[in-house]
Amino acid sequence: MVRSTTIVRASDALPLAASVDDEQTEQALQEHKQQAKLIFRRITPNAEPRCSIESGQYTLHYLIADNVVFLTIADKSYPRKLAFSFLDELSKEFASTYGPKVETVRKPYAFVGFDTFMSKTARLYQDTRTATAANNGLDKLNDDLQDVTRIMTKNMEELLWRGDSLDRMSHLSTSLRSESEKYRKAAKNINFQAMLRQYAPLAAVGFFVFLIILWKLW
C-alpha cells in the first residue's frame, strides 16, 4: 500500500506539499524519508522522469513532471503500475491547481492544502484490487505507465554507497552494457554450435576408425 507521499520542486528540492502521516508511520518511515531527501538532491535536469528505488521492505517511486517531483513510499509488494498511476493522478491535479505558481513560491510547503486530495486519492489506492478495477474501468493509465518494464529500477545501496546516478544516460549506459553482455554470450554460443556442426562429423569418423582398429587389435 501507499504509505507516504512528498512533492518537491525539482530544480532546488523545495518541499511543496506532503501527506500528513500519523506518528506510527513517521517512526516507521523515518529512515526512508531521509533517503527521499537524498533522492531529491540527486535529481538533475537529465534525471529519469520515472524511477523505482528499492530500500528494504519499501520501494520509493518518483515521477517528474513540469519541474515537480512526486515521490511516494510504498510497500515493496505494492504493484509498480498502481504506484505510478497514483503519482500520475497527483501530478495532473497538482498541475491543474497550482501549475503556474510552482516557480514563484519561496517558502516550504506553500501548497500544504493539497494533502486533502492526496489523502483522498491514497485511500482509493489502499486496496490493490479496487485500484486495479478503477484503472481498468476508467482507462487512466497512459501508454508509458502501462509498460512498467521501461521504468528504471535502482537499489538504495547503489545511490548511498556507489554514488550511482539517476540520469537517463547512466541508465542507458547500464542498459547498453547489459545488452552487450547478452549478445556477447549469444555470439559465443552460436560459434560453439557452428564448431560442433563443422567438426562433429570428423570426430565421429575418427571415433569409428578407432573402434575398428581397437577391434582388430583385440
Image (cartoon, helix red, strand yellow):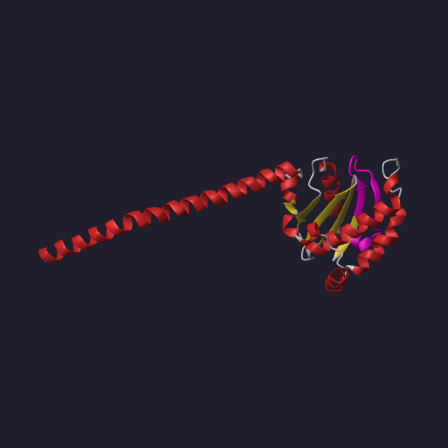
Residues 31 and 211: in front is: 211
Q: Percent position (x, y) of residue 8?
A: 80, 41
Relative to residue 199, is residue 43 depicted above or below? Answer: above
Q: Percent position (x, y) of residue 79?
A: 69, 57
Q: Quadrant of the N terminus?
A: bottom right
Q: Percent position (x, y) of residue 28?
A: 75, 52
Q: Which residue lies at the image location 86% right of the left edge and 39% below the top edge?
A: 102
Q: Percent position (x, y) of residue 13?
A: 79, 37
Q: Is residue 191 magenta?
A: no
Quarter of the image holding residue 86? Answer: bottom right
Q: Which residue lies at the image location 64% right of the left edge and 45% below the top edge?
A: 154
Q: Is residue 163 visible?
A: no
In the image, is 71 to the left or to the right of 209?
A: right
Residues drawn in magenta: 6-26
In the image, is 140 to the left or to the right of 184?
A: right
Residues 83 and 163: in front is: 83
Q: Quadrant of the C terminus?
A: bottom left
Relative to residue 68, is residue 137 depicted above or below? Answer: below
Q: Which residue lies at the image location 87% right of the left edge and 40% below the top edge?
A: 100
Residues 4 and 98: in front is: 98
Quarter of the image holding residue 141? Answer: bottom right
Q: Is residue 11 magenta?
A: yes
Q: Is residue 136 visible?
A: yes
Relative to residue 104, is residue 121 depicted above or below? Answer: below
